[in-house]
Image (cartoon, helix red, strand yellow):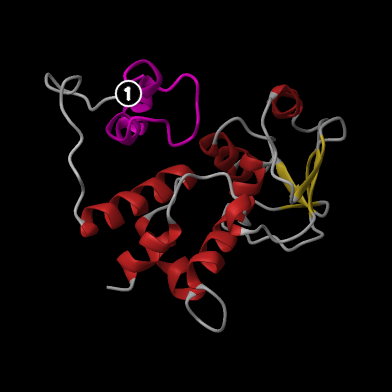
């Protein structure tokens, strides 16, 4: 329980849940923790504080480490195209993110566990790296015979699935049909602010 509260500490500060969870403490208490939390007015953030907050939101939503996010930014800024769009696309096409946002797992934490415990296959082959980058056309699946509990849980997840996924819940298969567009990615983050943070 203590660990769950710690995960949602940022949500309390923001006033909404980073993962849109109905069980998040911020749903009942959409204000910062502490004695003055309920009556405290939200301060206008400085530019740096705003950039930092957006970075924290992005890290939290996908459960990324600082090292992982910085490395993704550095890859995204190479070559042509807008860095913020490329960065978000790369993060959203990670295997753990696909398992989460396609509705196979109820949370990003469950998605990471499914992958690391070898319950997830990519094109029929077991992949246990959450950072594995999928390409359009690839199919992720769960072997119901080898992972019956995970398969049962996956079918019970009720989620709004982005248009770039083709989901077959009965067969427990998800196809990444194309690369996502920035505005389609279901995360409340100003990606440009994150880019500005790392580009300082």
Residue sitting nearer the eye, 170 or 121:
170
Residue sitting nearer the eye, 8 or 127:
8
Q: Residue furthest right?
A: 171
Q: Which residue is mark 1?
A: 30
Does the magenta portion include 20?
Answer: yes
Up/down of 117 relative to 93, above or below = above
Q: Is residue 197 left or right of residue 128?
A: left
- Near mark 1 (Cα within 10 A), the count class, few <14, some 14-19 or many ≥20, is some
Residue 147, position in %: x, y? 74, 31
Residue sitting nearer the eye, 89 or 68:
89
Residue sitting nearer the eye, 199 or 142:
199
Q: Residue furthest bottom?
A: 79
In the picture, which quadrant includes the C terminus? bottom left
Residue for point 79% across, 43% down: 141
Q: Is residue 31 left or right of residue 41?
A: right
Up/down of 80 relative to 91, above or below = below
Residue 19, position in %: x, y? 49, 35
Q: Residue furthest left?
A: 35
Viewer can see residue 129: no
Q: Is residue 179 left or right of residue 5?
A: right
Q: Quadrant of residue 37?
A: top left
The magenta-colored residue range is: 1-30
Residue 187, position in %: x, y? 51, 45
Residue 151, position in %: x, y? 75, 29
Residue for point 52% across, 73% down: 82
Callout 1: helix, strand or loop?
loop
Residue for point 38% across, 61% down: 194
Up/down of 174 relative to 16, above or below = below
Please give the count of numbered marks on the rendered protein: 1
Q: Quadrant of residue 144?
A: top right
In the picture, which quadrant includes the N terminus? top left
Residue for point 68% across, 53% down: 127
């Amino acid at each position: 329980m203590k660990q769950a509260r710690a995960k949602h500490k940022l949500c309390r500060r923001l006033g909404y849940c980073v993962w849109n969870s109905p069980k998040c403490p911020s749903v009942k208490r959409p204000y910062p923790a502490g004695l003055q939390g309920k009556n405290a007015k939200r301060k206008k953030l400085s530019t740096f504080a705003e950039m930092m907050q957006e970075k924290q939101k992005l890290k939290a939503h996908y459960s990324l480490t600082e090292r992982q996010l910085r490395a993704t930014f550095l890859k995204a800024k190479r070559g042509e195209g807008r860095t913020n769009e490329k960065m978000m696309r790369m993060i959203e096409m990670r295997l753990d993110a696909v398992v989460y946002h396609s509705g196979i797992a109820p949370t990003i934490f469950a998605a990471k566990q499914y992958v690391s415990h070898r319950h997830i296959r990519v094109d029929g082959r077991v992949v246990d790296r959450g950072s594995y980058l999928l390409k359009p056309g690839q199919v992720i699946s769960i072997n119901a015979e080898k992972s019956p509990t995970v398969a049962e849980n996956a079918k019970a997840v009720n989620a709004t699935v982005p248009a770039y996924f083709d989901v077959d819940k009965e067969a427990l298969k998800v196809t990444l049909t194309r690369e996502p567009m920035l505005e389609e990615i279901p995360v409340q983050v100003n990606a440009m602010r994150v880019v500005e943070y790392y580009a300082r």
